[in-house]
Image: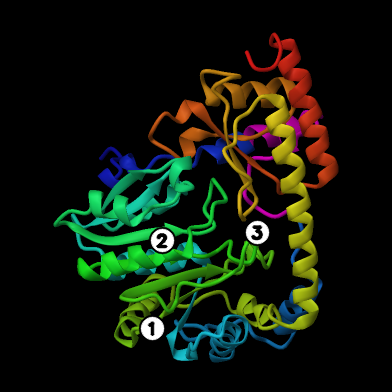
Amino acid sequence: MSFRPSDRVEEIEPFYVMELLARARELEREGRTIVHMEVGEPDFDTPESIVRAGVEALNKGHHHYTPALGLTELREKIADHYNSTYGKKVLAEQIVVTPGSSGALQLLIALLVNPGDEVLMADPGYPCNRHFVRIFEGVTVSVPVDATTRFQLTAELVGKYWSEKSRVVMISSPSNPTGSVIAANELKKIALLVEERGGVLIVDEIYQGLIYDGSRDTAIDLPGTVFVVNSFSKYYGMTGWRLGWLVSLNMEAVSGLDRLSQNLFLAPPTPSQYAALVAFEPETERVLQERCDRFRRRRDFLYAALLELGLKIDRVPDGAFYLYADCSDLSSDSSQFAADLLEQAGVAVTPGKDFTVRDPRRWIRFAYTTSLDQLQLGVERIRSFLSTQGGMGR
């Protein structure tokens, strides 16, 4: 019998940045030095206080299953975080701890989407989100956004693309790949519209701690049925620990999420949960805020440098650690441009085909997840590369 994968596997595209990263690693093994601006993973190690807590948990034998919804102590810590940081009333029982934010999004799509139901999301956006929808036999509606909407959905766009099959609207703020933050008044308009249409709103806030301009707020008290997703990966620097959470103010939904989590994951990683208990402590927060300031300095440098090189960026991004640039004045194909930068200049960046189905050859993403010294080196290498290609702005 020959192997035949399911239709869903055939329809799920690869995460192209991982192919580019693999090639970068191969070049490094050959002795090349590569400036990495491709992968959305902070270059900082997990804060030492969190590492110590994880090691202590292992030494104490905390490596058995926890409840599927997560450690009660951690759920209480996360609820306290919303209460103390944002002044929002959240109960521990409304928190679901998950294997990363990806686990949270999969649980929510499984909870909310029947075969054929539509999920509206912005294009450009994080590619795995539409693939989560496909896994559970839903249909992604990619809503085109651009600089005029700050690369975010608007209530007008949601109303335009909503159909009788629409069930969920998903928003990421700050977003990947653009770093844009949705305006609070616009988000409330969307929530009201979705409530009126009988739908559900999911707000992905995994970069919430990395907002450099404007206030940090949360969507948990928006009207209607709203779920908020967050993660210990980005701001807290715990990418490999695979830990996230979601907030559901609807307790009936929590019951369904519990059953789904039991069957899909059994439980989030136990040592990671014990380690995360100190993530909100003052000692850890001081470290995280200092890192946030360093990300801001990197953003400001790279934004100005890329404009000077001839790339076009509509505005300084509000948060996350990405710059989403229009490279059409430098190349007619961002995938080829990224490949040439890697092979000839030793700079790894991510082409637009990972994030958009509309004119992907025009766009390229730069991640400032490496040191300022490395970013400066990368800019000099790009400048040298462009000079050999006939000059900037061609």
| Residue located 58% across and 61% down the image | 207
The image quarter containing residue 389 is: top right
Query: Which residue appears farthest toward the left when viewing the image?
Result: 164
Callout 3 secondary element = loop
Q: Amino acid at mark 3?
A: Asp
Residue projecting furthest to the right: 373
Residue 24 versus residue 287 in the image, above or below: above
Which of 291 and 103 lies nearest the eye of the viewer?
A: 291
| Residue at the image point whose x is 38% and y is 33% from the top | 358
**Residue receiving disc 3:** 213
Q: Amino acid at mark 1?
A: Leu
Report how far apart the C-alphas of labels 1 and 2 lie in the structure: 21 Å
Q: Is residue 354 left or right of residue 64?
A: left
Q: Secondary structure at mark 2?
A: helix
- Name the quadrant of the C terminus: top right
Is 38 magenta? The answer is: yes
Mark drawn on residue 249:
1
Question: Is residue 32 among what the camera can see?
Answer: no
Q: Position of residue 189 (x, y in %)?
A: 35, 64
**Residue at the image position 45 percent from the left and 42 percent from the top:** 148
User: Which mark's residue is nearer the viewer, 1 or 2?
Assistant: 2
Name the N-terminal-most of marks 2 and 3.
2
Query: Dot 1: few (<14), some (14–19), or many (≥20) neighbours within 10 Å?
Result: some
- Residue 97 rendering spot, x and y as whole percentages: 50, 78
Q: List the residue tagged with mark 2.
A: 186
Q: How is the image coloured?
A: rainbow
Q: Residue 129 at x, y = what percent?
A: 41, 53
Stretch of the chain drawn in magenta: 22-43
Q: Residues within 10 Å of mark 2 (few under 14, many from 20)?
A: some
Tell me the CA gap for discs 2 and 3. Answer: 17 Å
Q: Around disc 3, counting alpha carbons within 10 Å, would you say few (fewer than 14), some (14 to 19), or many (20 or more)? A: few
